[in-house]
Structures are given as C-alpha cells and as structure tokens.
Image (cartoon, grey):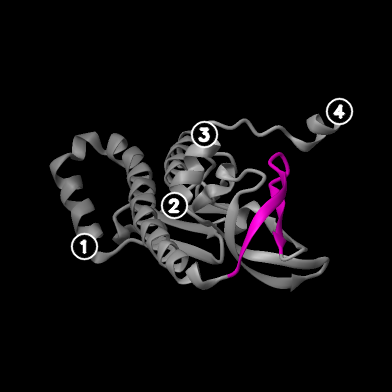
Amino acid sequence: MTLAPQITFRNMENSPRLEEAVLNEAGKLERFFPRIMSCRVAIEGPRREEFGGLYRVRIDLGVPGEELVVEQNPTLHKTLQAREADHKTKEDEPHRERRDPQRAIHEAFHEMRRRLQDYVRRNRGDLKRHEGLPMGNVVRLSPEEGYGFIDADGREVYFHRNSVLDGHFGRLRIGSRVRFDEEMGEKGPQATTVALVREAHQGREAATTVLIPAHHKAKG
C-alpha cells in the first residue's frame, strides 16, 4: 500500500512472513478505499494454554473523520475449535501452529473490510446530505502535494485531498464544479468536505484530460 502500515509484535519475535501477510491484506483494503490515512497492526502471541495457542490481532485504521478498530481476541468457541484441530492433526502440530497467526490476521482484516464498507456507505449518505452546500470551481490545484483552492464568490478556499469525498481528488481539474463545506483554519478558510458535482461526467472528462503540474506551466 502507499502508506506502509505500522506493525507491532507482542509476546513473540518479529516475523517477516507475518509482516508480508499484513502488507498483502492492507493493500487489498487500500484498493477498496484509497483514502486510508494510517494503519496500525498489533499481533500478540498466545499467553495462556487455555486459549489453544491462538493469536490476538488488533487493527487501527485511520480514515477521514474517523478511526476504525478491529480486535480479534481468542474466544471459547475458537479455543474449542483449535483443540479439536489439535486432536485430529496432532502429528501436524508444528504446521498448525504456523498457520494460526496468518489465519488470525486474515480474519481481522476480513472484519475490517466489512467495517470499511459500512464507512463508505455512510460516506455516500453524507454526499447526498451535502447537496444543499454552496458550490464553487477549482481554480488552483497541486496534484503532487495533494491540495488545491476553490473559488467561492471571489474568495479562495483551501482544501486537502483527504477532504475530497470518495477518493475523487484525482478526478479534479481546473474548473471542476464542486460542493463544499468550510471552516476557518489557522491560515484562513479551508474546506472540510469537497464533493464533485456530476461526478460521473467530470470523471470521464478527467480521464481524457492531462493535468499539467503548476511548475511545468510556469516554465512554459
């Protein structure tokens, strides 16, 4: 993923194999929702025998305006399942133990994807509620640094790429029509939410338009 997750191991040694598993799972989340701001993953080795050698996994995912948390802990049901697997495949014990942490990681990220889907659905509902917000046009855009400015009745309002709903920052062009909500920041007005007007139409236009960075224009 673009933003590497922070991985912490507790009660166990660091494992490159498990780090790779986390990176793969986190990459799937980012393809589903590209505006992930942070990802912290804690993997804890089993502490007590009654938990059947199961691992704990906690994921903290930062998204615009919210923090999503999933914590997979050993339960009685999982413990009984693990013991049953022990009884059936006792001779394969070393291999079963190696599979446990990866299974725990996969289950935790599977649950996080469900949480992220709920978040995206809520976000789309927010977009409908923003239909009554004022409109403006994008007048300045810096795709390399991830920000731009909106002309709002003669005023310029700053916005960051994380304020653009549904990860549509890449669809913006100079002149794009947007709805926005604003607040006063440390350096002046800034948009807290930016939504494309007629996003499907503007998305098609963006796909056929090459956006030339500001510094290249200046050289010309």
Identify the amino acid type marked 3: Ala
Residue 55 versus residue 202: which sits nearer the camera? 202
Determine the main secondary structure of the stretch shown in magenta.
strand
Q: Earlier in the sequence, mark 3 or mark 2?
A: 2
Gap between marks 1 and 3, in whole Å? 50 Å
| Mark number displayed over residue 219 | 4
Q: Is residue 10 visible?
A: no
Query: Is residue 150 highlighted in magenta?
Result: yes
Q: Residue at x 28, y 64 (%)?
A: 75
Residue hosting label 2: 45
Residue 39 versus residue 8: which sits nearer the camera? 39
Identify the amino acid type marked 1: His
Q: Is residue 137 visible?
A: yes
Find the magenta span and give its range: 134-152
Name the front one of labels 4 and 1. Answer: 4
Left/right of residue 129 with respect to residue 145 in the rendered view: left
- x and y, in percent, of residue 91 in the image: 20, 35
Query: Is residue 168 highlighted in magenta?
Result: no
Q: Earlier in the sequence, mark 1 or mark 3?
A: 1
